[in-house]
Amino acid sequence: MGKHNKVERFQDLEVWKKSHRLVLKVYNLTRGFPKEEKFGLVSQMRRAAVSIPANLAEGFKKRTQKDKSNFYNIAQGSLEEIRYYLILAKDLNYIIDNGEFIDSADEIGKMLYGLIRSIQ
């Protein structure tokens, strides 16, 4: 993408695409969690995961750097939250391996950091 090809929609952001895929993976993953976690860890994980692309979408249309940064920072916080829930789910033996998810979170984290730096 050249310098003059502006990203016009939040859906065009690579970091949004990757975070949306993470949401879908988290939903699939949590379907297999114990029923008693429906309103506990399942709900928390899904909410945190959804918050990442949702805040990217909301921040995308904000006009000021400060407003954009606020939403992108919330997305970063939610990403760290999902990272913790993945560790917890593994420690509770709800999942055997969280590596693929942690790798996704790491990649999204680097992209988010780059996005925030690009608007400052």
Image (cartoon, rainbow, N blue to C red):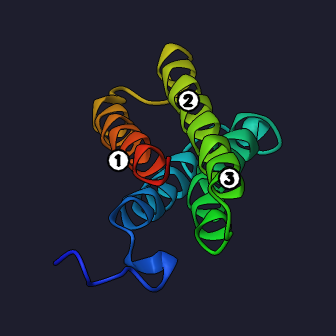
Please rate how many residues cluster around mark 3, counting C-alpha atoms within 10 Å: few if below 14, some from 14 to 19, many from 20.
Answer: many
| Residue lying at the far top of the rendered structure | 91
Could you give the CA–CA distance between mark 1 and mark 2, rounded to whole angstroms?
A: 14 Å
Q: Residue 49: x, y in percent?
A: 59, 49
In the rendered structure, the answer to whether residue 28 lies left or right of residue 106 reads right
The first of marks 1 and 3 along the sequence is 3
Q: Residue 43: x, y in percent?
A: 75, 46
Q: Which residue is mark 3?
A: 71
Amino acid carrying mark 1 in the image: Met
Do residues under tags 1 and 3 come within 8 Å of each other at their CB atoms?
A: no
In the rendered structure, the answer to whether residue 75 lies left or right of residue 83 reads right
The first of marks 2 and 3 along the sequence is 3
Do residues under tags 1 and 2 come within 8 Å of each other at their CB atoms?
A: no
- At 38% from the left and 45% from the top, the residue drawn is 108
Q: Which mark is residue 80?
A: 2
Determine whether the residue tagged by mark 2 lies in a helix, strand or loop.
Answer: helix
